[in-house]
């Protein structure tokens, strides 16, 4: 089934009032998947510095809202503090478990890339743990290319993990 058969989903700039829902969605990924670099759940207070780092309009967070509920979010972050990387950003996207696997991630990523283009960013990078087949498939579908794999850079529950680096060059 496609998410478009649900009540309409709105992609909009995240509001501060979304922070508890955004934290809950991120925590579901920490506990239920191996998709993040975090190992322990976070409180809303822990997540405040992340929120504050996105107050700069060049690095937005988009919330996906359905029937008044936030069901996912996507964000752009600086890739590096060095000024030479000014036009390069990193994308991130998390959906509530119930909203996964029905096309919403692809649609939200396309909205995020449109926003990145509008903001004048040139390159969007994404780091994805190699076992995250859904995220790799979603990014490829949205036009990202695999650049390479960083071998054994992660350690989770005693297991070394590879991280795949992808990028998309925004043109036009
Ligand atoms: C990864 C995530 C954002 C993808 O969003 P989604 O809405 O579930 O994905 P979509 O339904 O848009 O599917 C995109 C593509 O991935 C494929 N896909 C989805 N789930 C998959 C899975 N478990 N294994 C392999 N491919 C999968 C789909 O088939 C689709 O390709 P297709 O249209 O050619 O068939 C979402 O599943 C999620 O939030 N997961 C948990 C958090 C996470 O991993 N975030 C990314 C961190 S890097």
Image (spheres, helix red, strand yellow):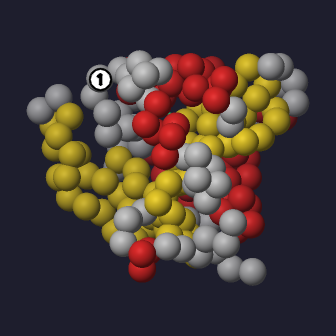
Residue 95 placement: quadrant: top right
Q: Position of residue 55 (x, y in %)?
A: 58, 46
- Left or right: 114 as drawn, with respect to 165: right
Residue 81 placement: quadrant: bottom left
x 81%, y 32%: residue: 9
x 30%, y 63%: residue: 149
Please name the residue that numbered disc 1 is placed on: 40
Q: How many marks?
A: 1
The residue positioned farthest toward the left in the image shown: 158
Which image quarter is the N terminus in?
Answer: top right
Residue nearest the viewer, comparing 123 with 101: 123
Q: Position of residue 125 (x, y in %)?
A: 48, 63
- Left or right: 129 as drawn, with respect to 70: left
Residue 150 placement: quadrant: bottom left
Q: Is residue 1 something one can see in this rendering?
A: no
Q: Is residue 139 something one can see in this rendering?
A: yes
Residue 80 sits above or below residue 39 on the image? below
Q: Position of residue 30 (x, y in %)?
A: 38, 27
x 73%, y 52%: residue: 111
Q: Position of residue 163 (x, y in %)?
A: 31, 54
Is disc 1 surrounded by few (<14), some (14 to 19) or many (20+) residues within 10 Å? few
x 83%, y 19%: residue: 67
Is disc 1 placed on a helix, strand or loop?
loop
Residue 160 sits above or below residue 48 on the image? below
- Left or right: 15 as drawn, with respect to 81: right
Which image quarter is the C terminus in?
Answer: bottom right
- Left or right: 148 as drawn, with respect to 136: left
């Amino acid at each position: 089934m496609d998410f478009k058969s649900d009540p309409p989903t709105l992609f909009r700039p995240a509001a501060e009032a979304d922070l508890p829902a955004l934290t809950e969605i991120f925590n579901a990924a920490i506990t239920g998947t191996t998709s993040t670099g975090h190992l322990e759940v976070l409180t809303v207070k822990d997540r405040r510095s992340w929120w504050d780092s996105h107050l700069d309009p060049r690095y937005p967070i988009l919330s996906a809202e359905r029937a008044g509920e936030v069901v996912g979010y996507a964000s752009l972050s600086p890739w590096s503090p060095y000024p030479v990387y000014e036009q390069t950003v990193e994308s991130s996207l998390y959906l509530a478990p119930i909203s996964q696997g029905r096309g919403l991630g692809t649609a939200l990523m396309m909205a995020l890339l449109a926003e990145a283009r509008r903001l004048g960013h040139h390159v969007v990078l994404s780091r994805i743990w190699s076992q995250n087949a859904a995220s790799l498939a979603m990014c490829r579908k949205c036009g990202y290319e695999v650049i390479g794999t960083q071998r054994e850079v992660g350690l989770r529950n005693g297991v070394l993990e590879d991280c795949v680096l992808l990028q998309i060059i925004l043109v036009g």
